[in-house]
Every structure is written in C-alpha cells, then in structure tokens.
C-alpha cells in the first residue's frame, strides 16, 4: 500500500488477534510499528515475531503519562510518528445493571484512551507534515444489542469523536477515520466458541451477507488503506468492514414481500 513504507505507526491493542493482524499488515507494508498494550505477555509475543522494526511498549490507556511515554518512545526509536491506530478496547458491560465505575472504565479505555494517545501524537504528526489516525468503531455502535449498553455507547461515541477530530486536525494535515467491523474472528470469538471457527461462522454468518464472520486480516487491510496514500481525501469517515451486516435490515436477506400474498399466509 503506497505511503506506509518507512512510516512509524503506533497500534494500541496490538497484543491479540485483530491487533496482531494490524501489526502484521503495517510491518509487511514497510512501516515501523509500536504495539501499545497493557498485556505485557501478549504484546511481547507479537513483537518477538519481528526484528526491531516492531516494538512493544507496555501502555495503560487510562494513564496520561503512560500514553505520553509510549508515543515518546516510538519517536525516540524511529525518529518520527505518522500513524496512530486506536484499536484497544474493553468489553466491560453489564447493560442496565452496570455501575458508574463500569461506565467510567469503559469510556476511559475505549474513548478517552484514544484521545489521549492522539493528544500525545499530534505534535509529532504536525512536525512530520501530517499523519493519519484510525479509530475502532463497531457494528455495535449502530444498532441495539440485548443486554449491552456500555460497549455500544462507547463505540457510537467513537464515530462522533472521529468527525470532531477530523475537523479540528485537518489544518495539520492529519486525517482521522474509523473502521466499524462486523463480527470478526478474535480472542473473544475464540474463547466463547472454544476456538471453533466453523461454529462461529455458523452462528455469526446469519448476520453477514457473506455467511461468515470476518478474518482479522480483512479488518487490517481496511485500516492500512485508510492510513495509506490511497486515502488522501478521506477524513471524518467511517468504513464499515462488516460483510454487509449494516446493509441488512430486519427483513434479513430473505424475500419478505411475498409473505404478504394470501397463499403464503399462515392458516
Ligand atoms: N471482535 C469483534 O468481533 C469486533 C467487532 C467489532 C469491533 N471490534 C473492535 O476491534 C477492536 C479489537 O477487539 P478485540 O475483540 O480484538 O479485543 P481484545 O479484547 O482481544 O483486544 C483488546 C486489546 O486491548 C488491550 N487493552 C485493554 N485495556 C487496555 C488498556 N487500559 N491499555 C492498553 N491496552 C488495553 C487488551 O490488552 C487487548 O490486547 C476493539 O476496538 C473492538 O471494539 C471487534
């Protein structure tokens, strides 16, 4: 992908399956990558697959000094900072019963964490003559899902935040976009399904026009595209990488109008 080679990217949440795919995509495209994650074991495991063009920096997005330290060490290691992917998230969510503390934790990581990373990154992107940011939304930020309040609301906030950031950072030549994945093969899917991809596709496939969930690499390619020179006039946009999930309505992908015909009417 044009324009990513020799750039430096910070990827939060690079320690598990989707984040790891993003790290691989950027490294393959010739970028230097800093993995910013609270998971020391997972982050180190991913970084160890590469030479010193990929580094892990233990980072807690709930802590301003930690965010600033991560960005500073990326610049120290590679001399500049051009790209930021705010992928890390927490799924803490007890719906209606969630406590204030749970709400604050969800927003602290999912929304505010990415903002603080951007605040730390902005001066370096300005110095580099611009940059690109990709925030992670979700299909969950666009529809209601039973029993889930915190995560979907935080993801909806990210879609609005992306527009605000895009507007105010455009004068710096910084583009800000989001991706909204559908169900994606990921740590959560692997854990819940007992590492059974076929079962995950069988359950999640009904909600996506391709009859399966996404591969993490499919999300990673969209992130890479938005950071590349193929996307120089795209900012403030949300890219649905959801296999048609959000194109489908309650009628699903089934002919509903014929059900009105008398002969179809249940007796
Ligand atoms: N899995 C899906 O199907 C799906 C669908 C739509 C959107 N998404 C989005 O994709 C992204 C990745 O999701 P995932 O399912 O791979 O999640 P995951 O839980 O596997 O990974 C999240 C990462 O964030 C890190 N993290 C959590 N708290 C942190 C903190 N305080 N500081 C730094 N890092 C922290 C975790 O250690 C982990 O590595 C998220 O933004 C999620 O909303 C996922």
Image: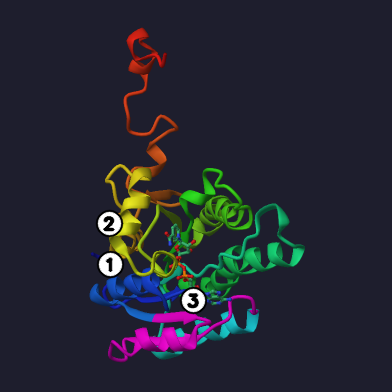
**Residue at which label 1 appears:** 3
The residue lying at 57 percent from left, 47 percent from top is 146
Instruction: Point out the image quarter for the N terminus.
Output: bottom left
**Residue at which label 2 appears:** 230
On residue 124, which mark appears? Answer: 3
The residue lying at 42 percent from left, 79 percent from top is 15
Q: Where is residue 239 in the image (x, y as percent from the top left)?
A: 39, 50
Q: Give the range drawn in magenta.
A: 34-63
Q: Nearer the viewer, residue 85 or 18?
A: 18
Q: In which quarter of the image is residue 75?
A: bottom left
Labelled pair 1, 3 in contact (Cβ < 8 Å): no
Q: Position of residue 67 (x, y in %)?
A: 57, 79
Give whichever of discs 1 and 2 has the lower sequence position. Answer: 1
Query: Which secondary structure lies at badge 2?
Result: helix
Give the crowd class for mark 2: few <14, some 14-19, many >=20 residues within 10 Å. Answer: few
Q: Which colour scheme is used?
A: rainbow
Residue 228 visible here:
no
Cα–Cα gap, marks 1 and 3? 17 Å
Give whichever of discs 2 and 3 has the lower sequence position. Answer: 3
Left or right: where 84 falls relative to 163:
left
Q: Does the magenta stretch include residue 40?
A: yes
Give the crowd class for mark 1: few <14, some 14-19, many >=20 residues within 10 Å. Answer: some
In the depicted structure, whether residue 49 falls above or below residue 147: below
- Outermost residue to the front: 267
The residue lying at 63 percent from left, 84 percent from top is 65
Q: Does the magenta stretch include residue 87?
A: no
Cα–Cα gap, marks 2 and 3? 22 Å
Labelled pair 1, 2 in contact (Cβ < 8 Å): yes
Cα–Cα gap, marks 1 and 2? 8 Å
Q: Which of 121 and 152 is in front in this view?
A: 152
């Amino acid at each position: 992908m044009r324009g990513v080679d020799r750039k430096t990217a910070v990827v939060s949440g690079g320690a598990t399956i989707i984040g790891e795919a993003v790290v691989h995509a950027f490294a393959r495209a010739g970028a230097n990558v800093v993995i910013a994650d609270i998971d020391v074991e997972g982050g180190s495991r991913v970084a160890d697959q590469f030479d010193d063009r990929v580094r892990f920096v233990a980072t807690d997005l709930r802590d301003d000094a930690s965010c600033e330290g991560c960005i500073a060490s990326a610049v120290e290691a590679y001399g500049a900072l051009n790209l930021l992917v705010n992928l890390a998230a927490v799924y803490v969510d007890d719906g209606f019963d969630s406590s204030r503390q749970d709400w604050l934790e969800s927003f602290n990581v999912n929304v505010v964490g990415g903002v603080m990373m951007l605040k730390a990154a902005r001066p370096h992107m300005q110095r580099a003559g611009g940059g690109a940011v990709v925030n992670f939304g979700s299909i969950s930020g666009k529809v209601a899902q039973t029993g889930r309040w915190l995560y979907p609301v935080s993801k909806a906030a990210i879609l609005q935040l992306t527009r605000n950031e895009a507007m105010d950072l455009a004068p710096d030549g910084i583009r800000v976009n989001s991706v909204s994945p559908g169900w994606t093969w990921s740590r959560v899917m692997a854990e819940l399904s007992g590492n059974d991809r076929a079962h995950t596709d069988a359950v999640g496939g009904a909600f996506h026009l391709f009859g399966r969930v996404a591969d993490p690499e499919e999300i990673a390619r969209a992130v890479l595209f938005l950071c590349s020179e193929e996307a120089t006039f795209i900012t403030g946009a949300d890219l649905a990488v959801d296999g048609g999930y959000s194109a489908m309505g309650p009628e699903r992908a089934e002919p509903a109008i014929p059900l009105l015909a008398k002969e179809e009417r249940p007796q």
